[in-house]
Amino acid sequence: DDYEEGTFTFEITSGFSSISYGTRRANYVKVGRMVWIGCEMITASLTENSDWLKYGTLPFTSANQNSSTGGMWKTVTSGNIDGNATFKVMGDSTIIAVLNGAGDAMAGNATSLADHANRTVALWGVYMTA
């Protein structure tokens, strides 16, 4: 199988606008079709909106298996993201979508990430590539 290590750009792709980042770090290891990632961001400032909160951009396009492509675990957050939230890798994409405890789309304005500067989000997870 093929093996690769690298970095990628971790960013908010939806749910906020006018985003200014402090620190961003994101690494991956790919073995065959499986990709393990670890990422962290600190936002300096941002403006919330009611769009679905999504993160990206993953280093490889995920498999087209929307219900079982992969997921992330929140290891750190200082922005009041629901403790029951799910971080789901969307099928056939490079996006991580945030779902609330009921399984519905979580909007950016359902968090307190925009309330203060220097909010941290860190995720770890695994997903399958196409």
Image (tube, rainbow, N blue to C red):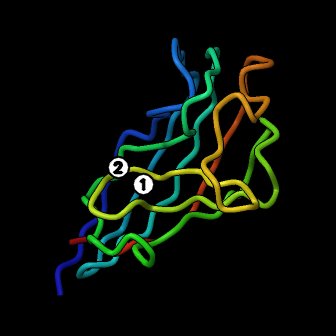
Residue 91 percent across, percent down from the top left: 34, 64
Residue kind at label 1, given as amino acid type: Asn
Check disc 2 and report the residue beneath it.
Answer: 7
The CA distance from mark 1 to mark 2 is: 4 Å
Find numbered disc 1 in the image and state the secondary structure of the residue it sits on.
Answer: strand
Look at the image and tell me in which quarter the C terminus lies: bottom left
Rendered residue at 58%/44% (across/down): 40
Residue projecting furthest to the left:
2
Q: Which mark is residue 3?
A: none
Find numbered disc 2 in the image and state the secondary structure of the residue it sits on.
Answer: strand
* N-term-proximal mark, 1 vs 2: 2
Residue 128 percent across, percent down from the top left: 33, 75
Total labels: the figure holds 2
Image-quadrant location for residue 116:
top right
Mark 1: give few (<14), some (14-19) or many (20+) Cα within 10 Å.
Answer: some
Rendered residue at 65%/44% (across/down): 106
Rendered residue at 80%/19% (across/down): 115
Look at the image and tell me in which quarter the N terminus lies: bottom left
Mark 2: give few (<14), some (14-19) or many (20+) Cα within 10 Å.
Answer: some
Image-quadrant location for residue 110:
top right
Residue 5 percent across, percent down from the top left: 30, 63
Residue kind at label 2, given as amino acid type: Thr
Say whether residue 53 is left or right of residue 1: right
Q: Which mark is residue 27?
A: 1
Contact, mark 1 vs mark 2 (Cβ under 8 Å): yes
Say whether residue 62 is left or right of residue 96: left
Residue projecting furthest to the bottom:
1
Say whether residue 3 is left or right of residue 120: left
Q: Nearer the viewer, residue 61 or 109?
A: 109
Residue 67 vs 93, above or below: the answer is below
